[in-house]
């Protein structure tokens, strides 16, 4: 106990830095769906797939019937998706990081049921699921 009192600033720095390292892992994320879950959503119908990757990544292969809106353009082009506000929306990127950001933007715009593909296009391909070029 004396050590903590004598070195309160060092202990405080250690606690704060530890908290800063844990924050990203504990921060709330949007809904995520595995490739299997996305396949089930698509098969049930009423699902819109939005691909937020670059044009080159999209051209290399994408989920069937995916709407291509790069993440940088999503804010300006979100109106194109207004018809899908009552549908399930699945957001796809290469690894899942950009999809989380896009999903948050869509939720802020009033979309109710938005999921990010966990692992992105890479996980989709690794699962052996079909892609369209």
Image: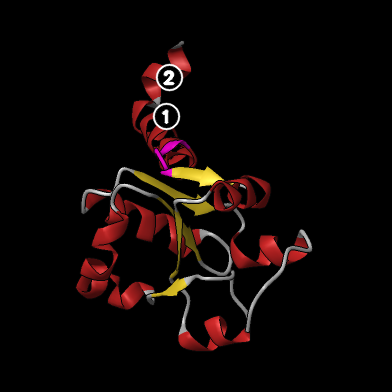
Which residue is at a point 42% across and 36% down the rendered structure image?
Answer: 19
Asked whether 14 or 132 is in front, the reply is: 132
Q: Please give the range of residues in magenta.
A: 26-30
Asked whether 42 or 73 is in front, the reply is: 42
**Crowding at mark 1 (Cα within 10 Å: few <14, some 14-19, many 20+):** some
**Residue identifier under label 1:** 11
**Label 2 with label 1: CB-CB less than 8 Å:** yes
* Secondary structure that dominates the magenta span: loop
**Residue identifier under label 2:** 4
Which residue is at a point 57% across and 69% down the rendered structure image?
Answer: 94
Which residue is at a point 29% across and 71% down the rendered structure image?
Answer: 74
Quadrant position of residue 83: bottom left
Image: 8 above or below 10: above
- Counting from the top left corner in percent of width and height, residue 124 is at 68, 62
Secondary structure under tag 1 reads helix
Q: How is the image coloured?
A: secondary structure
Asked whether 42 or 72 is in front, the reply is: 42
Which residue is at a point 62% across and 46% down the rendered structure image?
Answer: 40
**Crowding at mark 2 (Cα within 10 Å: few <14, some 14-19, many 20+):** few
- Counting from the top left corner in percent of width and height, residue 112 is at 31, 43
Report whether 131 appears left or right of 128: left
């Amino acid at each position: 106990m004396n050590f903590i009192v004598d070195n309160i600033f060092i202990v405080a720095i250690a606690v704060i830095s530890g908290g800063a390292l844990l924050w990203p892992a504990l921060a709330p994320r949007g809904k995520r769906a595995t490739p299997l879950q996305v396949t089930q959503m698509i098969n049930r119908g009423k699902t819109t797939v939005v691909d937020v990757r670059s044009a080159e990544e999209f051209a290399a292969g994408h989920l069937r019937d995916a709407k291509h809106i790069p993440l940088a353009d999503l804010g300006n082009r979100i109106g194109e998706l207004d018809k899908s506000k009552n549908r399930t929306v699945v957001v796809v990127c290469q690894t899942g990081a950009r999809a989380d950001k896009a999903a948050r933007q869509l939720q802020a715009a009033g979309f109710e049921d938005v999921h990010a593909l966990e692992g992105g296009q890479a996980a989709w391909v690794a699962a052996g699921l079909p892609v369209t070029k």
